[in-house]
């Protein structure tokens, strides 16, 4: 089986730029990805594009061809929508396309414009990833859903807000040197605990920001990379996807993410690695509790023990398995349709030594990216390895 | 959400709210005993297609809860409010806990269904009221 190489990555800064259109954001990310890859645009055979709320934020559907055009690519293009896992799902199908031998070069990525909706509008737009009839109409928000999970976790395994605060503090610390991050500011545990409540026990600093931004990846077959002498030493060697019931109340367990476990097990098996082989991870920390549930689902921590991982330094930059060296969704930002592809970009650059935090993972060869949609009714996991 | 989507009748769901208002809430039961919520034609657990209405237990228990301070615009005049997931026999429901100070909501709290009204939109809201005494 031919490996799928990450030939180029491109990110816009993530942040608050309400006037910028989605097409402009994606164009910028794609230019950076093509420049990084050395691959000509005319070699692209398909575009896989993730976006969640384009209809609500920009009154724009049918974004696949729009974004191919913005990137200057003449190739068939499809938009993927899996809530906040939209571009994780796009990456997965792009990997299959190349593995199947049906394409040698693809452009993958995603973009989201959100801040133009304002906080209330973005909260409402994000809520459509939940069950409209049985959750949203009862007043459940996304911070609320994760708060329900946090409360269930505390009740079952113990832990408290202060433990979660350490996740936020860690991810802000990691974002300090990341010029693409929305927040390059250190915070303290006290800051997190004293921040206004959003949906108790989730406070403002337990929550990722509302962000605009885009991410793009140029992926190629191994044969194409060798034939064109590309500098593409990192491959996506494992892909997995999991699914679950739509509404949180229908989950078998309110303090676990079975879909992420399913995706992780599939991706590890696909790559032929174990969780113990993983050197670093980018996980979907839309809220602090989400990072805890993710690292447990990925078997980086035992069930019930992930709550102490940041506090006790196991997942900090100098810990055994650094998690979210980019700053994560929490501090880097979360333009939802871009997030899954951006995680792949972060892992790839951390592994190749092209990242401001690569000094923490100098000998690393295996990274994992975890992208989640809704209350984890959708999850994708990808394993990246240095193979050349 | 567009006004059209907000105002539309949702067969199955609105019928369920009507029944719940009459204190005759129900769930869907398949021949294998799995419970689910309407509108639905297929059991999500086993794929059975012969689903029958079964009466919802009169009371349920709060499993987990949160106090929502930052709501969607449809609930901006309602916040802060308690949102909970409560177990009613074979199904769980998500609802707003009404008739109690949000700070007094706790796991295990015994509740019954009460269809409330959003102070913001006037729309019906699935609610839970603590069972008194």
Image (cartoon, grey):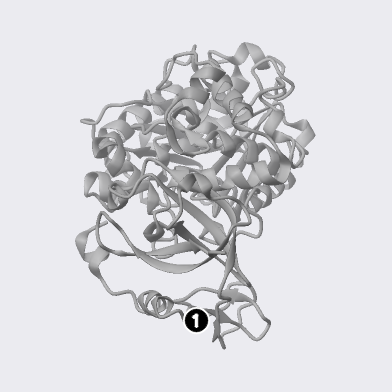
Q: From this view, report whether residue A282 is shown above or below residue A142.
A: above
Q: Nearer the viewer, residue A11 or B34?
A: B34
Instruction: Give the residue at x 58% y 47%.
Output: A149
Report the number of numbered marks: 1
Residue A331 relative to residue B15: left or right? right
Residue A339 relative to residue A52: left or right? right
- The residue tagged 1 is B41
Q: Quadrant of the N terminus of chain B?
A: bottom left
Position in image of residue A148 (x %, y %): 55, 48
| Residue B80 seen from this side | yes
Quarter location, residue A290: top right
| Residue A94 seen from this side | no
Neighbour tally class for label 1: few under 14, some 14-19, many 20 plus, Cα within 10 Å = few
Q: Quadrant of the C terminus of chain B?
A: bottom right
Q: Nearer the viewer, residue A377 or A89?
A: A377
Q: From this view, report whether residue A235 is shown above or below residue A311.
A: below
Q: Nearer the viewer, residue B116 or A264?
A: B116
Position in image of residue B41 (x %, y %): 50, 81
Instruction: Give the residue at x 40% y 80%.
Output: B22
């Amino acid at each position: 089986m031919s490996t799928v190489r990450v030939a180029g990555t491109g990110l816009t800064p993530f942040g608050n730029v309400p006037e910028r259109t989605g097409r402009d954001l994606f164009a910028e990310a794609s230019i950076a990805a093509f420049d990084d890859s050395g691959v000509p645009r005319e070699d692209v055979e398909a575009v896989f594009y993730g976006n969640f709320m384009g209809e609500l934020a920009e009154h724009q559907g049918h974004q696949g061809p729009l974004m191919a055009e913005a990137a200057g690519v003449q190739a068939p293009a499809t938009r993927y929508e899996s809530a906040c896992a939209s571009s994780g799902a796009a990456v997965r199908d792009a990997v299959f396309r190349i593995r199947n031998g049906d394409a040698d070069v693809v452009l993958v990525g995603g973009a989201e414009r959100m801040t133009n909706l304002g906080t209330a509008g973005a909260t409402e737009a994000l809520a459509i990833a939940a069950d409209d009839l049985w959750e949203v109409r009862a007043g459940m928000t996304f911070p609320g859903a994760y708060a329900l999970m946090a409360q269930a976790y505390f009740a079952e395994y113990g832990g408290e807000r202060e433990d979660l605060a350490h996740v936020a503090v860690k991810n802000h610390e990691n974002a300090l040197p990341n010029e693409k991050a929305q927040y390059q500011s250190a915070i303290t545990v006290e800051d997190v605990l004293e921040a206004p409540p959003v949906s108790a026990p989730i406070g403002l600093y337990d929550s990722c920001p509302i962000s605009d931004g885009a991410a793009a990846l140029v992926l190629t077959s191994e044969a194409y990379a060798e034939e064109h002498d590309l500098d593409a030493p990192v491959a996506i060697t494992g892909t997995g996807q999991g699914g679950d019931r739509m509404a949180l109340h229908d989950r078998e367990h309110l303090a676990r993410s079975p879909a992420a476990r399913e995706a992780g097990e599939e991706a590890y098996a696909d790559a032929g690695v174990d969780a113990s082989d993983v050197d670093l991870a980018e996980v979907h920390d839309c809220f602090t509790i989400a990072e805890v549930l993710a690292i447990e689902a990925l078997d980086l921590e035992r069930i019930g023990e992930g709550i102490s991982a940041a506090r006790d330094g196991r997942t900090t930059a100098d810990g055994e398995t650094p998690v979210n060296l980019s700053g994560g969704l929490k501090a880097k930002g979360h333009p939802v349709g871009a997030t899954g592809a951006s995680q792949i970009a972060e892992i790839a650059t951390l592994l190749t030594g092209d990242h401001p935090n690569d000094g923490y993972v100098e000998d690393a060869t295996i990274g994992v990216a975890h992208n989640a949609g809704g209350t984890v009714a959708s999850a994708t996991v990808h394993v990246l390895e240095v193979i050349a | 959400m567009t006004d059209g989507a907000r105002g539309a009748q949702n067969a199955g769901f609105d019928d369920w709210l009507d029944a719940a208002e009459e204190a005759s809430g129900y769930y869907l039961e398949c021949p294998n005993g799995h419970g689910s919520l309407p509108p639905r034609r297929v059991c999500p657990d086993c794929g059975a297609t012969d689903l029958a209405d079964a009466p919802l237990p009169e009371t349920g228990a709060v499993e987990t809860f949160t106090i929502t301070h930052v709501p969607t615009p449809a609930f901006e005049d309602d916040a802060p409010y308690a949102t909970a997931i409560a177990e009613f026999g074979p199904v769980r429901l998500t609802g707003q806990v009404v008739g109690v100070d949000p700070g007094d909501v706790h796991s295990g709290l015994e509740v019954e269904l009460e269809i409330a009204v959003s102070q913001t939109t006037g729309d019906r809201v699935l609610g839970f009221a603590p069972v008194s005494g």
